[in-house]
Amino acid sequence: MKAKRLPKDPGPAGWNSLLPPAAPATPLEDTVTADWLVIGAGFAGLAAAHRLSKLAPDDRIVVLDAVRVGEGPAGRNSGFMIDLPHDLASADYGGQLAHDRAQTEDNRRGISYASEMAEEYGLDAEAFVQSGKINGAATQKGLSHNENYAKHLSAMGEAHNLLSEQQMQRITGTDYYRGGLFTPGTAVIQPARFVRGVAVGLRSNRISLYENSPVIELKRDGNWVATTPKGKVTAPKVIMAVNGHLASFGYLARRLMNVFTYASMTYALTDDAVARLGGDPIWGITPADPLGTTVRRISGTGGDRIVIRNRFTFDPSMEVSDKRIARIGQDHDAAFAARFPMLSGVKMEYRWGGRLCLSRNNVQVIQELEPGLYAACCQNGLGTAKGTFAGVTAAELAMGVTSPGLSRALNADPPSRLPPRPISTIGANLHIMLHERRAGGEL
């Protein structure tokens, strides 16, 4: 199975750019053997390697990543590990009660496992802290979404707190939001700091991590053999933690949707800008409408900054142009200006895109694809929490360890088939554009 294509991550990964330079990369430049191969060093791959190290402490584990840790999709998200239902296709994120309770249980297992790794490797609160998040509502429609979601959370028995317009202004410094919905279970992370910290912690005489080493061919010759541009890894068991890139190897063709979302990050705010803004120094807002604008204010390594994330595009090619980054950057500037008129003149330092993998029926891919070949893929827009859960659960599947979450994954329907191209591409992007337009002031 030769990879039909390799993904391209557009723009600099802003979160990673804030950090000190990492140690020089160690690409694979030899032929090595291992008991386990993990392909991908994002949330799923790192969690899988960590879980394997606990379940099989004497086994040799090799992890391969196509780029530097923190430069790929894991370092390009908004930094929320969300525990509660977060279906991007739903008006207010919620679905059926039984399904949402099960999803919440799985998401919380992912967050709990991430917390264990953060504690084991001494990561600080900037990398990982379970501080909750706010669904921000800028319109009457957004307020209605929050109210409906709050009723759904009450039916689930989940803690939440509706915030007034005045409370939102005290937190954010802006009068843009008419209300909010706070939920306490979300972990807020600096994603590049987290994955780089875990990667450093994992390395040992039994766990080798090779960066800048994309797998260009995977075949079974007794054992599995993965070929990179300069080396090979032979292992009896492989976990593929590559999200939508799985289809590039011939699995689940026309069932996985590679979607890009986009973000911009300001330069560090000056003392004068901080004084003009007011509000709390650290907070995170997801939009009341799933296709609205996510906003974070961060403080720590790299200074006091604001991150804007909005817009989605369906791109089966797994790459987008610099022109699109620049064009969508104009939308980010407009969203920023609408929310923070007191920060007129503040510019963006970093703009980037990041890949998500969605399935039409909102299911993950945690299964044995072939003997000894396992998948921990398709996180449906929650790559941090669901990715961690998928990596842990795939490792347990490979080791014969059972859990309720694994049972749910194995009994789930397969991802729904997509229409043929170009119908799927045109249709998906028109659907996204329509719902973004309906988001109105939430965008």
Image: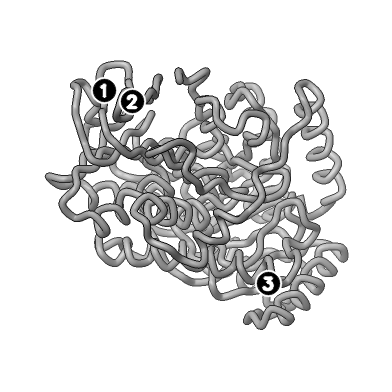
Q: Earlier in the sequence, mark 2 or mark 1?
A: 2
Q: Nearer the viewer, residue 110 or 410?
A: 410
Asked whether residue 281 is in view, the answer is no
Mark number for residue 279? none
Q: Name the residue located 61 percent from the left edge and 74 percent from the top edge.
A: 183
Instruction: Give the x, y percent position of residue 441.
Output: 81, 53
Quarter of the figure that contains the N terminus? top left
Residue assigned mark 1: 232
Quick one: label 2, few (<14), some, or many (20+) residues within 10 Å?
many
Q: Nearer the viewer, residue 134 or 197?
A: 197
Element class at badge 2: strand
Instruction: Give the x, y percent position of residue 49.
Output: 31, 49
Residue 87's place in the image compared with 187, above or below, is above
Give the quadrant of residue 145.
Answer: bottom right
Element class at badge 1: strand
Q: Is residue 125 left or right of residue 278?
A: left
Instruction: Give the x, y percent position of residue 153.
Output: 70, 76
Three-letter amino acid code of the residue under disc 1: Lys
Three-letter amino acid code of the residue under disc 2: Ala
Asked whether residue 84 is in view, the answer is yes
Q: Earlier in the sequence, mark 2 or mark 3?
A: 3
Residue assigned mark 3: 168
The Cα–Cα distance between marks 2 and 1, rounded to whole angstroms, is 6 Å
Q: Nearer the viewer, residue 436 or 99?
A: 99
Mark number for residue 226? 2
Nearer to us of marks 2 and 3 is: 2
Instruction: Give the x, y percent position of residue 220.
Output: 36, 25
Q: Earlier in the sequence, mark 1 or mark 3?
A: 3
Q: Are marks 2 and 3 in contact (CB under 8 Å)?
A: no
Q: Nearer the viewer, residue 266 or 437?
A: 437
Three-letter amino acid code of the residue under disc 3: Met
